[in-house]
Image (cartoon, coloured by chain):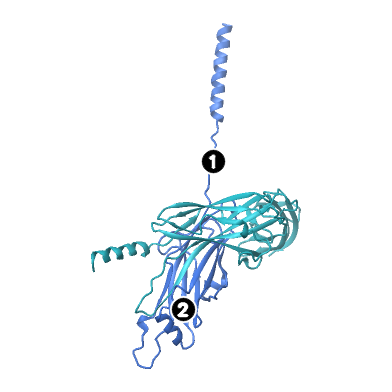
């Protein structure tokens, strides 16, 4: 083996040996923005390659639909009702991040002046492409490539539309006996994305509030379902309880309350 | 004497006030938490090597028609604006040739993993056949967590490849390099 071949082999070993791509997105995977038709917004996505090896990162747009049973259902660009994919332009479709390198990708979103929809969304896939292209000649070998990607949701609310507000409804409330917690499924039947948290009071048959739970904040998009989980700190003991749930949205500052009676076994 | 008393009283008040001020001084602490999501595979290529399965008796098929491979998927997750455990990982496969059946099992990470690691979907608790083009959640309910970054940290992904039927066409394709990584891809997506 010549010296050149040795160096080449070592180089490949360093690149593809035991190292694996470690791209981290240092932003939230939900990027919400409010704008009026005719305005331009910029969203910055920050990336970091935490491995010492170079890594290829590709960017692509996708549409999606929210489904309570399936979660995000990804669709071709332009195929969904409230798509904003056509408003988006990217600086680059692909970058190479050197080992330990950081980068920020700027997304430009031009809201058309005649846009009359109250809300919309699109997904930016940030894909860490596999660097696999060798074919094992002379061997009966099947290779399957694997890659990872981040789904960054770009969520638009129209500031000029009065009805651009979230509307949260409880679809289902159940008791998880295994984790001793209450699980409430909320759906947003409104026309805006928002963040919400819940205050839940548990009242026993004597009318006493035996526990108050403040749940953590989460993003909810139109037609999206989110589960609110509230751990209980008492033994239910087959008794009847009343649960008072008040959800509060952060951006619109709306309150959505219900009371629900349930015997916990 | 009055002046002395007044001066003494003022000094005492000043010292007292000064002591009170220092006793009630507060220090504001701002804790800034970064937002990040990381997902990585220990290896980006699954290799199923049938080379050693060549028949030793004329007339036989290419040995075992079943192979296994494993890797680890590592994640780090924290979202300051969405701190409920809503992050999930889904899988989508494309380009698997007819005549091949690829199954996946997901095993929870070991003791180096901390935080809300989510739940493995019941289908994938044991080997489950993957279907071309169908996106499927494999881990849901991920919150703030990390799995560790050592070679055997993270969710263990166990694959099993079965060659269905007599396999002759597939063996030819594999030997010709037609059924390799260029055509078959598995994408893991992290979303919230």
Give the class, few, some or many, for how many residues have Cα within 10 Å of label 1's Cα (few <14, many ≥20): few
Residue A258 x, y percent position in the rendering: 75, 56
Is residue A160 visible in this depiction of the protein? yes
Q: Would residue B70 appear left or right of A69 to someone viewing this image?
A: left
Residue B94 x, y percent position in the rendering: 52, 73
Name the quarter where the N terminus of chain B is drawn: top right
Q: Residue furthest top?
A: B1
Between residue B145 and residue B55, name the one nearer to us. Answer: B55
Residue B161: numbered disc: 2
Residue A36 x, y percent position in the rendering: 68, 49
Q: Which of marks 2 and 1 is in front?
A: 2
In the figure, residue A193 lies in which quadrant? bottom right
- Chain letter for the cyan colouring in the rendering: A
Q: Would residue A60 appear left or right of A53 to someone viewing this image?
A: right
In the structure shown, which secondary structural element does the residue marked by tag 1 occupy? loop
Q: Mark 1 lies on which chain?
A: B
Q: In this view, does B47 lie above or below A117?
A: below
Residue tagged 1: B30
Q: How far apart are marks 2 and 1 (CA)?
A: 52 Å
Is residue A233 visible in this depiction of the protein? no
Q: Is residue B168 above or below residue A220?
A: below
């Amino acid at each position: 083996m010549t010296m050149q071949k040795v160096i080449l082999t070592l180089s490949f070993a360093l690149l593809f040996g035991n190292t694996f791509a470690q791209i981290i997105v240092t932003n939230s995977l939900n990027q919400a923005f409010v704008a009026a038709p005719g305005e331009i917004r910029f969203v910055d996505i920050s990336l970091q390659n935490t491995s010492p090896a170079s890594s290829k990162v590709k960017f692509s747009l996708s549409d999606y639909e929210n489904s309570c049973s399936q979660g995000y259902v990804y669709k071709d660009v332009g195929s969904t009702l409230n798509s904003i994919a056509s408003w988006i332009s990217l600086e680059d479709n692909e970058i190479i991040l050197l080992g330990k390198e950081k980068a920020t990708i700027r997304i430009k979103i031009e809201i058309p002046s005649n846009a009359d929809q109250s809300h919309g969304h699109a997904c930016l896939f940030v894909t860490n492409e596999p660097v696999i292209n060798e074919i094992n000649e002379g061997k009966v070998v099947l290779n399957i490539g694997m890659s990872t990607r981040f789904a960054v949701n770009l969520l638009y609310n129209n500031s000029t539309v009065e009805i651009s507000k979230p509307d949260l409804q409880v679809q289902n409330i159940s008791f998880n006996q295994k984790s001793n917690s209450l699980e409430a499924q909320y759906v947003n039947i409104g026309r805006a994305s928002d963040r919400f948290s819940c205050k839940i009071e548990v009242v026993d048959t004597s009318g006493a509030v035996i526990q108050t739970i403040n749940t953590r904040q989460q993003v909810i998009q139109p037609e999206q379902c989110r589960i609110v989980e509230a751990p209980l700190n008492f033994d239910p003991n087959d008794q009847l309880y009343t649960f008072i749930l008040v959800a509060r949205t952060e951006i619109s500052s709306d309150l959505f309350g219900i009371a629900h009676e349930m015997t916990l076994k | 004497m009055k002046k002395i008393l007044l001066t003494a009283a003022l000094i005492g008040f000043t010292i007292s006030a000064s002591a009170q001020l220092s006793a009630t001084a507060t220090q504001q602490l701002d804790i800034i938490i970064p937002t990040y999501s990381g997902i990585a595979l220990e290896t980006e290529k699954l290799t199923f090597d049938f080379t050693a399965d060549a028949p030793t008796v004329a007339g036989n098929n290419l040995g075992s028609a079943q192979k296994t491979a494993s890797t680890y998927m590592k994640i780090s997750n924290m979202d300051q604006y969405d701190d409920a455990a809503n992050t999930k990982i889904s899988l989508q496969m494309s380009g698997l040739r007819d005549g091949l059946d690829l199954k996946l099992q997901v095993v929870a990470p070991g003791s180096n993993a901390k935080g809300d690691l989510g739940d493995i979907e019941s289908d994938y608790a044991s080997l489950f056949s993957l279907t071309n083009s169908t996106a499927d959640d494999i881990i849901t309910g991920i919150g703030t967590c990390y799995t560790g970054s050592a070679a055997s940290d993270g969710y263990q992904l166990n694959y099993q490849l079965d060659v269905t039927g007599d396999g002759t066409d597939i063996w030819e394709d594999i030997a010709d390099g037609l059924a390799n990584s260029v055509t078959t891809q598995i994408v893991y997506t992290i979303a919230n």
